[in-house]
Structure formats: C-alpha cells, structure tokens
Image (cartoon, rainbow, N blue to C red):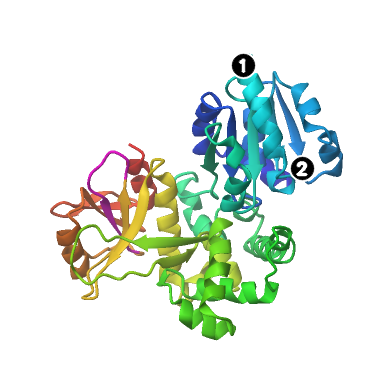
C-alpha cells in the first residue's frame, strides 16, 4: 500500500496546477472525489510547498483538536489548513465562514483552507451554503488516459484509475482491492451518509448498471428487477451519481426538431469497478466478455470529459432513426460542440449514423477515437485519434 502511494505521488496529476491557482485566488477550495482516489496525496503535495497543517477528521485525536474550532484554527491563521473527510464534521462550515471573513479584514484573503470530501457533492454543497462566494469546488477523478504512460493504457482499462488498483502487483491483487472498495462503500461509507439503503439492493443496482454499461436509462426495468418502484431506483441512482461513482450522460437537444432520445445514458465511471462488479479478472476474460466494447467506450468517455477544460458540458446524441454521436463536448467559448465517435480496434470505420448526426449537430470538430497510436485523417473533415492524443488536443 505504502509503495503504491509513493508511486502514485510520482505520477503528475493534471489537477495540481489548477488546485494551486485556486488556492491563490479564493479563501477555501473543496477537493471532492471518491475515496482512495488520491485526494490526500495531492493535498500533501500542495502542503509541501507552503506552511500547512493537516487534520484527518476520521481521527478522534484530530477531531478533538476542533472541540473549539475557532480557537484552534485561529492559531494557524498563517498556514494552509487541510481538513480531510469534512463530511464527518459538517458543522465546521459555519466556523470557517467567520474565520475567512475575519482573515479577509486582516488581509489574509486567499489560500486559508483546503477541504477534502469523499461524500456526496450535493451534501457538501448544502453544508457549505454559508461559504457562498468564499469557496471553489474541484473534482479529482481516478487516473485517466492522459495521465498514465501509453504502455499502461491497457492496465488502466482493465484495473481502472484508482491508484491502489492501477498500481497493484498483479491483476488478482487489483481485483481484490476493488472488491474491498465496493464492499466498504456499501457497508460503511454510504450508511454514514444517512440514507438507509439495503446494501445488497444497492450492490445489485450497481452490478446491473455495469452489465448495461453505456445503455439508455430504463428506470422502470431496473425497478422491476429490484422489486422496488421507479422513484426508489432514481433515488439510488442519484446517490451513486452524487458519490461520483456513476455518470449520467445527458442527451443533446439543441434546437433540432427531429425525434430524439430523451433519456440519459448511464456509465459506471471507473472501468475497473465495472470489471470488479462483473468479476472480470484479466484481459483474457475482458476480451471474451460481452461488456468489452461498452467498457472501452466508458473509459474513453470518462478520460475525455476529465481532460476537457473546466466548464465543458458533455452530452450524447441519438435520434429515433439511428443517427448517433457517442460524445458531444461543448467547450467554454465555443459556439458549436466537438463530435466524438469511439471505436475499439485498429481500423476504425465511420458509420452512416455518425455522418447523419453531424449534419444535424454541425460540430466544430469531428473526431474518431480508436485503439491505435497514430493520428491521421480518416475522411474529409474527420480525424482519427489515439485516446491519449485526443485528450491532449482537448486541453489546447
């Protein structure tokens, strides 16, 4: 575990300069993400560059220091205070407001607090209403295709991007870690958030989503399979989305009048968790499994969304007639989206549905992602990209 943490700290995270900039601009930054994604490692990397104090709010000793939070934190007014697992002590937000405002009056306006949270993003936002105008939210996702070396891309696909899973000594050790991760979320972390959800029911839903990775959401069918009502399924799904474990990819509508699919697509965000939920051990088993194409598509979509500039909106496009684009990315400042089609394999072919969809959407760029390592023109106005290279192109 310690070895993995050291190696993970050596893999540069794209978010580091963004986090540093935020701390130089606002009094408080909330760094959100699932457990074990590397938030603490990244925070300690920042702490090494400036006077800091770190408090783990899962530790009784550190919580005891905050019995009188104003008194304790005021003693560290000249330092960056890192508060890990803030959801354990949500009442702290009220104290932070007073400290930030008093610090502003003394000229200490930025970089006071770095708040780390593994809980629901919505819960964190509700708890921090008192910090409106004083806090910026950043999300740390698992490692993605641009952050790892090209030779690790297959390992990233199989094992997912959680550092302990990606850097495990073997595929079997990686799978054991992910199974433990799922069990911990279901049996410990989610019950701590308050909702009383049977862990077995939530596991079955999570597994069903993995089986239908990238499928159109059919809440009624899921409800029948789980023997609950549709509203309950939506509530459970909302929880997994808020925990940053599942992504609902919304359909793009624009101003077109065609009959469009209106339900979202649903992806388990980390491909390694998809494979753990389906008990897929290694690449041989993955390549023989029916989820193989959808799994690769999900990994590519997650990497592209995370690599895109902050403020980018992500959608898919599909008409009743079969015109389809896997991913539309609307970047800030651009009037038209990028249209991205995802193909697993070394010889991508453009489907008629993609051409038809592009005629409707009129994207600014038309890109095909494939499994090869060379970028080349595929047709007039359409380029084929390796996944890593398109991630880099999106950041320009």
Direction from residue 89 to residue 175 in the image, left or right: left
Q: Which is more N-terminal, label 1 or label 2?
A: 2
Q: What crowding class fits label 1: few (fewer than 14 Cα within 10 Å), some (14-19), or many (20 or more)?
A: few
Foreground of the two, 319 or 134: 134
Main secondary structure type of the part rendered in magenta = loop
Q: Which residue is mark 2?
A: 57
Residue drawn 21% across the image and 69% down it: 353
Which element carries disc 2, helix, strand or loop? loop
Q: In which quadrant of the rendered view does residue 134 lie?
A: top right
Q: Position of residue 68 (x, y in %)?
A: 82, 32
Which mark's residue is nearer the viewer, 2 or 1?
A: 1
Q: What crowding class fits label 2: few (fewer than 14 Cα within 10 Å), some (14-19), or many (20 or more)?
A: many
Foreground of the two, 318 or 153: 318
Query: Over which residues does the magenta segment extend?
Result: 331-343
Visible residue check, residue 224: yes
Residue drawn 50% across the image and 27% down it: 21
| Real-space CA distance between mark 2 and mark 1, rounded to the nearest whole angstrom | 28 Å
Task: Decide: is 231 above or below 241.
Answer: below
Q: Position of residue 268 (x, y in %)?
A: 51, 64
Residue drawn 28% across the image and 38% down it: 333
Q: In which quadrant of the rendered view does residue 29 lie?
A: top right
Task: Tell me if residue 335 is in the magenta stretch.
Answer: yes
Direction from residue 212 to residue 327 in the image, left or right: left
Which element carries disc 1, helix, strand or loop? helix
Task: Tell me if residue 60 is in the magenta stretch.
Answer: no
Q: Position of residue 386 (x, y in %)?
A: 34, 52
Direction from residue 224 to residue 248 in the image, left or right: left
Residue drawn 67% across the image and 71% down it: 197
Q: How many marks?
A: 2
Q: Position of residue 87 (x, y in %)?
A: 69, 48
Residue 105 is labelled as: 1
């Amino acid at each position: 575990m310690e070895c993995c943490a050291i190696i993970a700290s050596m893999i540069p995270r794209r978010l580091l300069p963004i986090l540093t900039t935020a701390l130089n601009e606002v009094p408080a930054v909330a760094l959100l993400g699932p457990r074990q994604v590397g938030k603490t490692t990244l925070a300690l990397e920042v702490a090494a560059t400036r006077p800091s104090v770190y408090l783990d709010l899962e530790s009784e000793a550190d919580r005891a220091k905050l019995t009188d939070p104003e008194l304790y934190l005021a003693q560290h007014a000249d330092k960056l205070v890192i508060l890990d697992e803030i959801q354990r002590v949500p009442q702290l937000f009220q104290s932070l407001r007073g400290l930030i405002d008093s610090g502003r009056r003394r000229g200490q306006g930025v970089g006071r607090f770095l708040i780390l949270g593994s809980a629901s993003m919505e819960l964190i936002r509700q708890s921090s209403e008192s910090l409106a105008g004083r806090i910026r939210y950043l999300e740390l996702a698992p490692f993605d295709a641009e952050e790892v070396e090209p030779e690790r891309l297959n390992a990233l696909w199989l094992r997912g991007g959680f550092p302990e899973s990606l850097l495990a000594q073997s595929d079997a050790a990686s799978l054991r870690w992910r199974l433990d991760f799922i069990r911990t979320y279901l049996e410990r972390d989610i019950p701590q958030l308050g909702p009383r959800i049977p862990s077995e029911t939530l596991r079955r839903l999570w597994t069903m989503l993995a089986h239908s990775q990238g499928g159109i959401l059919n809440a009624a069918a899921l409800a029948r399979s789980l023997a609950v009502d549709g509203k309950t399924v939506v509530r459970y799904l909302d929880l997994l989305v808020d925990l940053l474990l599942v992504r609902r990819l919304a359909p793009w509508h624009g101003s077109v009048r065609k009959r469009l699919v209106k339900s979202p697509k649903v992806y388990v965000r980390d491909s390694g968790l998809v494979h753990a939920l389906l008990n897929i051990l290694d690449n041989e088993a993955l390549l023989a499994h029916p989820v193989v194409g959808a799994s690769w598509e999900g990994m590519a979509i997650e990497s592209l969304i995370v690599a895109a500039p902050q403020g980018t909106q992500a959608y898919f496009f599909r008409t009743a007639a079969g015109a389809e684009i896997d991913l539309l990315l609307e970047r800030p400042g651009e009037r038209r989206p990028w249209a991205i089609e995802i193909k697993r394999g070394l010889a991508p072919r453009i489907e008629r549905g993609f051409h038809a969809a592009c005629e409707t959407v009129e994207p600014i760029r038309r890109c095909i992602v494939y499994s090869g390592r060379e970028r080349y023109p595929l047709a007039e106005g359409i380029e084929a990209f390796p996944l890593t290279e398109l991630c880099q192109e999106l950041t320009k």
